[in-house]
Image: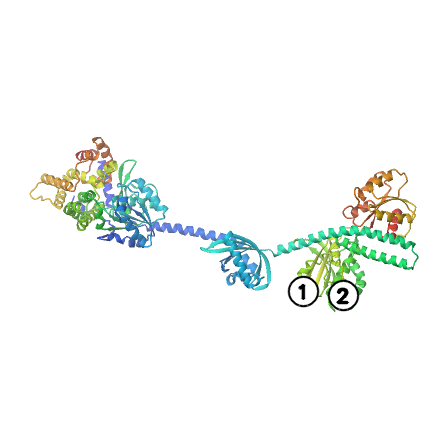
Amino acid sequence: MKERRDWNQMRDSIIGLGEESSRRTYYPELLARVTQLEAAQESLRQSEANLRVLFNSLHDAVIVHDFEGRVLEVNDAMLAMYGVDQKSCRTYNLMDYSAPSVGDQGLEAKFHEIWSTLRSEGHALFRWKARRPLSPGLDFDVEVSLRQAFWFGQEAVVAVVRDISERLRLEAMLHQAQKLDSLGQLAGGVAHDTNNMLGVIIGYTDLLLEDAPAATPLANDLEQIRKAALHSADLTRQLLAFARKQPINPQVVDLNVLVESTHKMLRRLIGEQHALVWKPSTTLWSVWIDPSQVDQIVTNLAVNARDALGSGGTITLETANVQVDETYAHQHPDAKPGDYVVLTVTDDGHGMTPEVQARIFDPFFTTKGLGRGTGLGLATVYGIVRQNEGFISVYSALGEGTTFRIHLPKHLGENPGAQEAEVALKGGKETLLLVEDEEALLELAQRILEGAGYRVMSSSRPIEALHLMETNSEPIALLVTDLIMPGLNGSELYQRIHASRPEVRPLFLSGYPADTITLQELSEKRAGFLQKPFTRPALLAKVREILDA
Amino acid sequence: MDESVLGELRKFVAPEFIFGPEARRLVGRYARKLGGRRILLVSDPGVAAAGWMGECSTLLEEEGLHVTRFLGISPNPRDTETMIGAGIFLDSASDLIVAIGGGSAMDCAKGIGIVAANGGNVLDYEGVDQVPAPMPPLICIPTTGGTSADVSQFAIINNTREQVKIAIISKAVVPDVALIDPRTLVTMDPYLTACTGMDALVHAIEAFVSNAHSPITDVHALEAIRLVASHLRASVSEPNDLALRTHIMLASLQAGLAFSNASLGCVHAMAHSLGGFKDLPHGECNALLLPHVMDYNFTVAPERFRRIGEALGCDFRGLNDRECRARLMNQVLELRRDCGIDQGLAARGIHTSDLSRLASKAIEDPCNATNPRPPNQDDLKALYAEAM
C-alpha cells in the first residue's frame, strides 16, 4: 500500500500541476545575472571614482596623449600647471604645451624621436621646456616621464610632468654658493702667500726710507715702490674679504649712522650727473659688524650702481628691519630664518641678463671696460656679508635696473665696547721672541724690532724657538709669532710657552687667521693680532700696545 | 480508467518544434533568436563521423556565433560526462546549448544545462521537479527515430557509481526548440534503426496504457504505434528511403509527445536498470522487455491493449481477452524479430544471479508510478526472468 501511495504522488507530480512543475524560462536567471552585473558595474564605478580622486590628487601633471600629440586625458594638476581648463585643454596639441626651442619643425622631429625611443624602450625620462598656451612668455622647466599605454584600447602615451623650475633655481643658487666658496679658498690661499712677499717688500722699503735722505730721487723711488706694494696689499685684502678670511674687528653698529657717514664720500664717488637718494628706516636694529666692512659694502655697491647708470639716473639707499621666515629661507639656500637689518641699494640703470647675474659675485668677473674695475668689488661684498652670516639677494632685469638687498643679522647681545687706541710709534728695551717660518719676513721683522731698541731672539722654526727659550733664563716680554707654520702653529707654540712662562704674551702675525685661531681665542689669550703684510709703524705700534697693556 | 482520466485537469507540455526535411538547417537562426552568442554544441563521435555535427557547427558559425564542441559522450550518457560538459559550458562562457544526436547527446545536454544553471552534481536532480532554476536555452536536433528526448521532459543519466540510469523529470528539461529532420535518420544502421524504432513503439504503448494518459496523449500514442507497425520493417531493410524515415521520425515525435505528458511504465523502469548495469542500447533493452511487461499489464487494461493491438495491425474480431493477449504478444514478438532483435537477456550477458539486483534498482524508478499495474520488486524480477 505504501509503495502504491508513493506512486500516486509521483504520478501526480509527473502530470505536473504543482507549483514547482510550471515551466519557467531562463530569463529570471538572466535577470539575476544582470543584477549581478549591475552590482559589479556599480563597484567599478566607485573604483573609477576612487582612482579619479587619486589621479587628481597628484602634484605632478598627467597628460595622456596619442602618438600624434593629441590630448586624451589630463588631471587637475595639469590644468593648474598649464593654465588651461577641462574644456580648452584638449583643443591644444602637445606642441602647444612645449616651448619651441629649436623651432616648430624641430619640435615635431624631437617628439617623433622621443616616441620612437618610447616604442622601443617602453618608457622615457627627460627634461623639457613646457609652455602655457595662453601665456607663452611664462615657459617653465619640467621633467617628463613617459610610459606606453593603451587608452580605451588605443595605443597611447602617459606623460607625468613634474615642474622642476623651482628645483633648478635652487640648484643653480646652491651651485653658485659652492662655486664662490671654492673660489674663496683659492683666493685666500693666493692672498696669504702674496701677503708675505708684500710684507717683505714694504718692510725693507720702510727700512730704506729711514736711511734715505728726504726729497731725493732715491726717496721718491722708494716711495713709489712702497705705494705699489700697498696697493697690491689692498687687493689681497679685498680677496681675503671675499674669502671671508679678513681679520675683522666687529662692533655693535647702527647701519643708519654708518651709511650716513659715508654719504659725503658717496656723493663724490657717484658724481654730479646722478641722483643719490637716502631713505633710512626710522627705527633700525643694531648689527654686529666691523664698520670698515660696511664702508666696503656701501662703496662697492654704490660704484657698481653708478657704472650701471648712463647719464642721469638715480641710486637709492634704504635700510629696513626684515623678518625672514621659513618659506623665504627655503627658497634662498643662503638665508636662515631670523631678524635682519636690510640695506637696499637700487639703481634704475640698464639691469643685468640672467647670465651676468649668475656670475656677478665671481672674483675678477667684470662687465666694465678694461682698466675700469678689478672685478673684486661685488666678490668682496659677498665675502663680507657671508662672513657676517648675512645673505644677499639680487633682483635685476634688462632695462629695469638692479636691486641689491644686503641682509645682516640683527645683533642680539650687548655692545662689548670696542676701543680704537692710537698708539704712539715708539720702541723699547724688552726682550722679544720672534718666530716666523718665512726667512725673509723673519729677518725683516727682526731688523725693524732691533732698530727700535728691542732685544730679539729669533727663529724660523717653532721647535727651535722653544729650545731657545728653555736654554735662556732671560725674561721674555712678548712672543711675536706667525700663526701658520709647519710643525707647531703659532697658537700651539704659545700654549707650550705659556705652560712654563705664563707672563709671556703673544702677538700673532698672519694674513690668514681664520683656520687656526678665532677672534674669541685672541681675546681670551689677551693676544695681539697684526695682519700681514704690515708696515713698520704698524708692527712697532702693535708691539708697544701689547707690552703697555 | 479510460473515463476516470477525462475528468482530470491536465496539461500538455511540448516545445516549439519544426518537423520536416531540412529542419536541422534552421539551427543558426534559432540559436541567434534565442539570444545565443557562444554555443556549446553537444554531440557524439558517431554523429560527428556522419557529418551532422560539422554541418551544424558551420551553420552556427555562419550566423556569427562562437561554437565550442563537446563530443565526449557514451551511448548511455554518464554523470561524469555530463559534469565535464557543464565545466566546458562554463569555462567557454557559453550561453546556449545545441544538442545534435540520439538520446544520449540530448540527455547529456539537458544534464549540462541543469548543472550550468544550478551547480552541484547532475545526480542531485534525480526525480520529479527537482530542478530549481531553468537551464540555458536548449535546441535539440534528433538524429535517431525513437528517443524523443527532443520533445520530452525526461533526461536519463547513467549513475556510473551505482550502475543504474536515473531519471530527471522536469519541465525545466523540455528543450526550447526541436528541429526534427527525418533526413538525419538515413545515416543510422539497420540495427540502430530497429532499436530506436522499437523504443518509439514502447514509448507509445507505455504512454497509452499509463495511468496518467489523457485524450491528447492517446491520439499521439496510437498514431505512433500505427506508424511504427506500418513502416519500421521497411525502414530497417531500406535505410535510404526518406519517406520511410519520415514516417518513423513522425512516429518517434508523436510517441514522444505522448509519453512526455503521460509518462511511461515498467518497461522503462526495468530498461533503465538494465541499461545502467550492462550498458546495452536503450531501445534494445526496451524491445527485449516489452512483450513481457505487456503480458503482465494486459489484465488491468484489456480494452486499451486491444486498441494497441488494432493499431499494430491485429484483427481481434471474435477473440476473447485471452486470445487477444496471445495474438498481441505474438504480433509484438514478430515485429521485433522481423527487425532483427532476437534472443533474450541471457544472450546479452545477463545471469540469473543478476536479476535480484536489476529488480531492486528497477523498483526505484519513477516510471513505475504510471504503470497501469503497480509492480513490486518480485514482479519485476519475474519479468526479467521471463525476458532471459
Residue B180 falls left or right of residue A479: left
Q: Quadrant of residue B350?
A: top left
Residue B128 visible from this viewpoint: yes
Q: CA distance from mark 2 to mark 1?
A: 21 Å
Amino acid at pointer 1: Leu
Number of marks in the image? 2
Quick check: A503 above or below A83?
Answer: above
Residue A276: assigned label: 2
| Residues under numbered marks 2 and 1 in contact, where contact means CB atoms less than 8 Å apart | no
Q: Residues within 10 Å of mark 2 (few under 14, many from 20)?
A: many
Task: Check disc 1 and report its element: helix, strand or loop.
Answer: loop
> How far across and down, in percent of the image, does residue A458 sit?
87, 44
Q: Quadrant of residue B270?
A: top left
Quadrant of the image containing the N terminus of chain B: top left
> How far across and down, in percent of the image, does residue A268 sit?
80, 65
Amino acid at pointer 2: Leu
The chain carrying label 1 is A
Task: Check disc 2 and report its element: helix, strand or loop.
Answer: strand
Q: Residue tagged by mark 1?
A: A398
The chain carrying label 2 is A
Front-most of B299 and A453? A453
Q: Earlier in the sequence, mark 2 or mark 1?
A: 2
Q: What residue appears at the point 83 percent right and 39 percent down from the top-left corner?
A: A499
